[in-house]
Amino acid sequence: MESINPGSELLALVLTLVLMLSHYLSPLMRRLPGLGERGVASFAGGVAVAYVFLHMLPELVEGNANVGRLLAGVEPLTPLLDLGIFIVALTGFTVYYGLELVAVRAAEKAPAAEGKVYALHLGMYCLYNFLITYTMPLRVQSGLVYALIFTGAMSLHFVLSDRNFKRHFPRRFSLAGRLILVGSLAAGWGAAALSELISVLGVSLMIAFLSGSILYNVFKEELPAERNSSYAGFTLGLGLTTALLALEAYLSHP
């Protein structure tokens, strides 16, 4: 178990508010000055891909080491320790891939069931958002710069995921849906703030599940089809994020 200091909780609240605003204002953020929707999507894709490869995947390896240390004395689990965190990440990837298939097929074959599918989809994305902000205080405490980059990547990601929601459920996903997603972000931070101690094992598993779902969403949504993409925007986002992560790694090296 690990305690979170009040300063980290406060900074995590600020970052949570940024994420909440990105959901609320997502229709206005699809186009930015000098960048059309295509450029924003490609820039966001570059940011997300760099973050996944240069921070999230190494974070999974570190989380696996933490789990290994915590469960080293549990004899029946020992053979699975080397794969444990990665199995959880794979589960996150698979769950959100399945959700996407259900949404697409329901829209095509069973319009009458659209309401139930929408509720399931929205509920799973509320869980996704909850995990993002529940783990935010520990991210801040572990490294503020990484938490800032994560927040920027997720803010752009939310803009695109809201667009995806609108495409699948054009009649249902509106301001009310975005406010529900905003509320799930607030709930995640609130749950973390009310917890006196955070389980390192629990957070490692949550981050692994979240990483798998983010991996799926990045490669599905944030690498747009060739005709809808801007390679310049993609490389700009990728280059800036790579430079920031490399600078932080250099500065934090003892």
Image (cartoon, grey):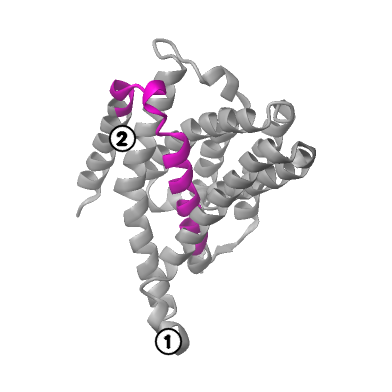
The mark found on residue 104 in the picture is: none
Q: Nearer the viewer, residue 117 or 86?
A: 117
Badge 1 amino acid: Gly
How many numbered discs sit on the rendered protein? 2
The mark found on residue 73 in the picture is: 1
Q: Which residues are magenta?
A: 205-234
Q: Nearer the viewer, residue 18 or 64?
A: 64
Name above or below for residue 166 compared with residue 49: above
- Decide whether residue 215 is among the magenta residues: yes
- Decide whether residue 26 is among the magenta residues: no
Q: Tell me where residue 111 sits by quadrant.
A: top right
Determine whether the residue tagged by mark 2 lies in a helix, strand or loop: helix
The mark found on residue 241 in the picture is: 2
Q: Main secondary structure of the magenta part?
A: helix
| Residue 229 can be seen in this image | yes
Q: Tell me where residue 174 sits by quadrant.
A: top right
Q: Position of residue 182 (x, y in %)?
A: 65, 36
Residue furthest top as drawn: 34
Q: Tell me where residue 104 sits by quadrant.
A: top right
Residue furthest right as drawn: 112
Q: Residue drawn 56% across and 64% down?
A: 197
In the picture, measured across the screen, residue 166 lies left or right of residue 253, that is right
Q: Position of residue 159 (x, y in %)?
A: 53, 29
Q: Residue drawn 68% across and 36% down?
A: 107
Between disc 2 and disc 1, whose residue precedes?
A: 1
Q: Residue drawn 46% across and 47% down?
A: 216
